[in-house]
Amino acid sequence: MHENAFIGRQPILNRQQQIIGYELLFRLTGESLSAEFSSDMQAGTNVLVNTISNMGTDWLVGNKLAFINVAESMLESNFLELLQPQRVILEIVETTKPTAELLSRLKDLRAQGFGIALDDFVLTPQTLPFMEFANYVKFDIQQLGIKQVPALSKELRKFPVLQVAEKVETKDEFKQCLDFGFDCFQGFYFAHPETLSAKVINPGYANILNLLNMLRNNAEIRDIENALKRDVALSFKLLRYINSAGFGLSCEIQSFRHAVTILGYQKLYRWLTLLLVTAGAETGAAPALLKTAVTRGRLVELLGGHFLDGQEKDNLFIVGMFSLLDVLLDMPMDKILETLILPDPVCDALLERSGIYGPYLELAEACEDPDMLEVPRLCENLLITPDMLNRSHVQALAWVEEIGV
């Protein structure tokens, strides 16, 4: 029964809005809910640890951390020894009691190199003993109410902990928490920002859109070469990309024609879609958002790749990645699609989450929701098992770290 747990994730950001880690969320499917909570937690944790240890923690490369919720049963188990302590922050859930045994275990875990976070924390004489072992303290700002937050935050300043504002849902809340002096942030605001009205597309974007449309129309290689020459930044990035180790070419690229020939239209198209999304960095889009878009593209591609192949896989990637273009470009999706020549099924997916690709995008988006309420139903409709989903998820994160977005 309890093999059926799905992994979700939510990014945790620093004050510069860069991702420092992910809270890995796991949700068990319906049939496991009859078990009592402790075994339920154990079961979920079991899956989580197996997933992480079986898939290797390579995707937590660089300085990314995994924040994992742990109940008392998990803290006492020897599961934890399977994880890489330097990469893992154990989140102590708020129902945990600071018994002498538990505090001794925390001391031991800290000595092994694990980080400790206190989830939904409120400082009371009962919870005070935890502060000796905590590296992070997380405040649920919705539950506390934003008015209560400054005083609580100030009270914890005397302890050497990083403060994390959780459930940050709007730009305004983010700004307030930044002003209160929080170190880290987590919440829907970073994964699902709201879209504003249309704005002019800047030249960088216009050139990429133009090239994408030319490739879709199978334009002459000479015309593509000329279009590339008109944009210094674009051509520089393209040559740097091709000459990077990824291609392992024995020869240096001589010309744009050479570059286009080597890459082929398909790969060039794919590279440009990646560039279209990451070009947002120059326009001041949050780095976390760019990463979410690229991860989503890869995840949609991997999920759909179980059932579709060839050209369809490229379309899946584009669907996932472009699903945040409205936010990145700050304009409605239908207006963006007027500037792009895209196949109808791609447009259906982006506008209505319908057609052949829509359900895969819907599933990828559902994985970004901390409650993951829709995940089991969507997986069932698409015949995707928890194992397929979790593997794809971890592979998508690994890939994004590898390409270094």
Image (spheres, rainbow, N blue to C red):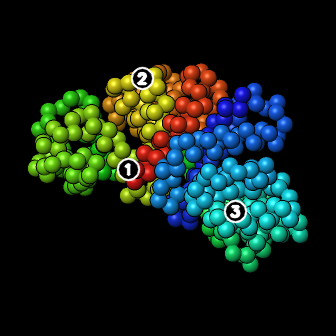
Q: Give the answer, above or below, for where 281 lies relative to 314.
A: below
Expressed as whole percent of the image width and height from the top left, the position of residue 74 reads 74, 49
Residue located at (19% from left, 47% from top): 249
In which quadrant will I find the N terminus?
top right
Residue located at (83% from left, 55% from top): 96
The type of residue carrying mark 3 is Leu
Residue located at (10% from left, 50% from top): 254
CB under 8 Å between discs 3 and 2: no
Q: As drawn, is 270 to the left or to the right of 87?
A: left
Mark 2 residue element: loop
Residue beneath disc 3: 109
Q: Nearer the viewer, residue 197 or 185?
A: 185
Mark 3 residue element: helix
Q: Nearer the viewer, residue 34 or 299?
A: 34
Q: As drawn, is 384 to the left or to the right of 35?
A: left
Residue beneath disc 1: 403
Report the mark closest to the observer, 3 or 2: 3
Report the mark closest to the observer, 1 or 3: 3
Q: Residues within 10 Å of mark 3 (few under 14, many from 20)?
A: some
Whether residue 335 appears in this view of the structure is: no
Counting residues from the N terminus, which is met first, the one under dot 2 or under dot 1? Answer: 2
